[in-house]
Image (spheres, coloured by chain):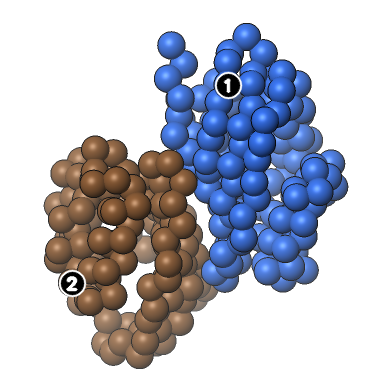
Chain colours: A brown, B blue
Amino acid sequence: MSTQEVADKLVSLCKDGKYDEAYELYADDAISIEMPGMPGDEVTHGKEKIIDGYYEWANSIEEVHGGTVGEPVVAGNHFMLPMTSDATFKGQGRWKMEELCLYQVENGKIKKAQFFYDVPDMG
Amino acid sequence: MSTQEVADKLVSLCKDGKYDEAYELYADDAISIEMPGMPGDEVTHGKEKIIDGYYEWANSIEEVHGGTVGEPVVAGNHFMLPMTSDATFKGQGRWKMEELCLYQVENGKIKKAQFFYDVPDMG
């Protein structure tokens, strides 16, 4: 798949809430990078651990209030996707966030994902 | 300035080729991150060194054939800007590139810039 095709497929699966399938777009040795200052590892290595991290995050949610997936912007082997989410986390309160998700594609798979957002005050 | 205002100002200055003024949007202690595998430092610390790097790059250009600056996508304190350039570099040939430029804003200044693009085969 081309970068544009991977981007379109990711958007479509995220919009449909098909996250299991979305992670199939990742390469086995993909890496995923969060903002410094967040709980958990800043860099996660390997699709398996990235999926574990997703489920850990999903299980920490008490209630989802909303969320959007924007249109991808493609440049060569990279694409960027704006997303928003609004959820209440167990024992942590509500966090409404906007982020820019940056993906690098290699051989038709996501090789690297990096997320940019305002780090909340963890108190 | 808000993140949107910094983004709009950067776009306007880049479109007008006013790069000297564009760098005034950077904080003194800003950092700038290029792709791994490129010549030069991957991370540049401080506005002064970032500007030096820009002039070094600009002076390596033999001829500019084209370039575009896209529309910014803003999320919280970050914004992303797609750009393209097409130039012949002294003794290195022509490089037509597309990139996604990612900026983090703090107190109305660019605190961090990170550039995503396909790294050319340096032979």
The quadrant where residue B90 appears: top right
Question: Callout 2, which amino acid?
Answer: Lys
Q: Nearer the viewer, mark 2 or mark 1?
A: 1
Residue drawn at (75%, 50%) of the image: B15
Amino acid bearing label 1 = Arg
Q: Chain of mark 1?
A: B
Rendered position, A43 above or below A84: above
The numbered dot on residue A14 is none
Q: On the rendered structure, is B114 left or right of A18? A: right
* Left or right position of B2 against A10: right
Image position of B70 with respect to A121: above or below: above
* Image quadrant where residue B47 sits: top right
Q: Nearer the viewer, residue B46 or A106?
A: A106
- Dot 2 crowding, Cα within 10 Å, few <14, some 14–19, many 20+: few
List the residue tagged with mark 1.
B94
Q: Residue furthest front?
A: B65
In percent of the image, x 61 and y 32: which residue is there? B86
Co-location on one chain, circles 2 and 1 = no
Chain of the residue under label 2? A
| Residue A81 appears in view | yes
Q: Quadrant of the N terminus of chain B?
A: bottom right
* Residue A31 appears in view: no
Where, quadrant-wise, is the C terminus of chain B in this rendering?
top left
- Residue shown at 28% from the left, 89% from the top: A63
Q: Which residue is mark 2?
A: A18
Residue B80 quadrant: bottom right
SS for dot 2:
loop
Left-right relation of B59 to A23: right
Residue B84, how many percent across, how many down? 58, 42
Q: Position of residue A69 (x, y in %)?
A: 38, 73
Determine the CA span between mark 2 and mark 1. Answer: 42 Å
